[in-house]
Amino acid sequence: MNEMQKHIIPEEATILDALDKINRLSGGAMTLVVAGPEGKITGTLTDGDIRRGLLRGTGLADPVKDLVHRRFMALHASASADERLQTMRRAREAGIRLLPEIDADGRLAGLVDLSTVRSQLPLTAVLMAGGRGERLRPLTLNTPKPLLEIGGRAIIDYNIENLARNGVKDVYVTVKYLADMMRGYFSRPRHGIMARCIEEESPLGTLGAVSLVNFPPQGHTLVMNSDLLTTIDLEEMYLHHISEGAQATIAAIPYTMSVPYAILTTDGPRVTGIAEKPTATHFANAGIYIFANSLLSRLPHGERTDAPDFLLDAIGRGDKVAYYPINGTWIDIGSPEEFRHASDLMQHHRSLTKLG
């Protein structure tokens, strides 16, 4: 019996049948999907629905259709990607764990367990993983930096898991240094994602390798460094990108600078103010971007391009570039100190192994 069949029950089945079926789902999402004539879905049924029915006098021999919840949330085949995303958000807020996917004929096409997949972002993703990681030597002499282990897992694995939890399945990984090891790592699915490796023939900077990916003319693409540990909310970043109508959105982290001296404010030779040991907070580029594919189409194919230069050019052309502040963990593992810090963090905060 496949997973969908475990959750389907006909309207004419008894309440006792439903209780038996729910009991068999113990440990999983304890929700049944009720099918009417011709297999069309008419509603859902939970143990809570049954308890409330029994308290009202419904008998165990009565049919399921007497208790079916007909105003149920579902993901419909006719819905747009953004409509599906909003349905999933409403379901999470309502505490619903299982969402049925309904095809054009009204039949069950699939089930989405919101405890494992929290969203379905309509994004392509590109993880940049071609760097040599020279600042982390000797750790990277025989291992590409994205495959270094923290908390018993490769660094890049945390980012793949975050993509999977957000329903991003179209994933590319750009490789160059120790490319065979990277291709070997992604020779099988990771968290249900069969990522495709794209190899740079020569170093193409922090963004140039993205030009090697064939994107559809419409839509949006997430580009991120693969050696980050972060709890960034990709769904919120995507919605921010869309609501801003941006061509590009840069994830940003706050960076505070303190001056250990009293700083003078001047007007010519005249002092107009004194600030004692001031601090200033700026936003730093976190190495995570969402681009409109129409903007990425301007990348020169196979040429070295760095993200700051490309974004400055876009700003100069009048394209809207927004930023999204990260509220959570962000560690750029670029030095031995940062590697040790991330390892210690994982050791003392094992909950971070559930990033995203």
Image (cartoon, rainbow, N blue to C red):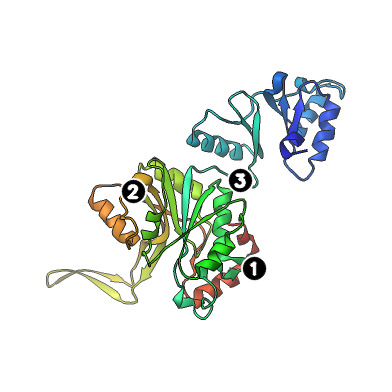
Is 269 on the left-hand or right-hand side of 334?
left
Q: Which residue is mark 2?
A: 297
Q: Which residue is situated farthest in the left direction here?
A: 268
The type of residue carrying mark 1 is Gly
What residue sits 86% from the left and 22% below the top? 59
Task: Tell me the quarter of the picture where residue 270 sits.
Answer: bottom left
In front: label 1 or label 2: 2
User: What is the C-alpha distance between the residues marked 2 and 3?
Assistant: 30 Å
User: What is the C-alpha distance between the residues marked 3 and 1?
Assistant: 23 Å
Residue 152: mark: 1
CB-based contact (under 8 Å), mark 2 and mark 3: no
The type of residue carrying mark 2 is Ser
In this rendering, the answer to whether 174 lies above or below 43 is below
Q: Secondary structure at mark 2?
A: loop
Q: Which residue is mark 3?
A: 117
What residue sits 63% from the left and 43% below the top? 114
Q: Position of residue 159 (x, y in %)?
A: 54, 58
Question: Viewer-proximal residue, 288 or 255?
Answer: 288
Which comes sooner in the sequence, label 3 or label 1?
3
